[in-house]
Amino acid sequence: MHMIMMITILFIMISNTMMLLSIILSKKSFMDREKCSPFECGFDPKSVARIPFSLHFFLITVIFLIFDVEIVLIFPIIMLFKTVNMLTWTKTSIFFIMILLLGLYHEWNQNMLNWTN
């Protein structure tokens, strides 16, 4: 029992010594406003917060998210191929793909896919 306490105290002393040494010897970095910002979004954090934001960039982001979610919705359709009959699966797939193509046509018609301003 006495030996276990001595080993435990020794381990605690060694770990505390190592933590103290790491605090003393570590490089102290200067924490400015930019380093303390929570994320890097491409904007200068020291500038005015109310700068004009490109609406086109926002629309491209929304289009990407929509198509990303659509990919997640296509996977269950593929898995249903084995459980439902062929006619139901074909109708469902064509309906879903037609909605996607109509949305893509509308975006193309509105010039959302052109990157020029």
Image (spheres, helix red, strand yellow):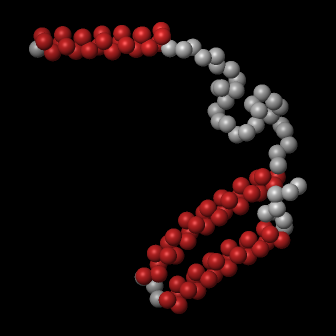
Q: Residue 8 location in percent, x, y?
A: 22, 15
**Observer-nearest residue: 3 or 112?**
112
Q: Is residue 68 left or right of residue 44?
A: left
Q: From the viewer's perspective, tell me whether residue 39 is left or right of residue 26.
A: right
Asked if residue 5 is positioned above or below residue 44 in the image, the reply reads above
**Quadrant in the picture for the C terminus:** bottom right
Q: What quarter of the picture does the N terminus occupy?
A: top left
The residue under the point 61% across, 61% down is 68
Q: Is residue 9 above or below residue 103?
A: above
Quadrant of residue 5 within the rendered picture? top left
Identify the image quadrant of residue 47: top right
Residue at the outermost left position: 1
Compared across the picture, whether 20 is left or right of 102 comes to left
The mark tally for this picture is 0
Hey, which residue is sitting farthest bottom in the picture? 87
The structure residue drawn at horizontal position 65% and vertical position 26%, both measured from the top left corner, is 36
Q: x, y (%) of residue 13?
A: 30, 10
Specify the quadrant of the image occupied by residue 67. bottom right
Residue depicted at 80% across the width and 69% down the height: 108
Residue that protrudes farthest toward the right in the picture? 117
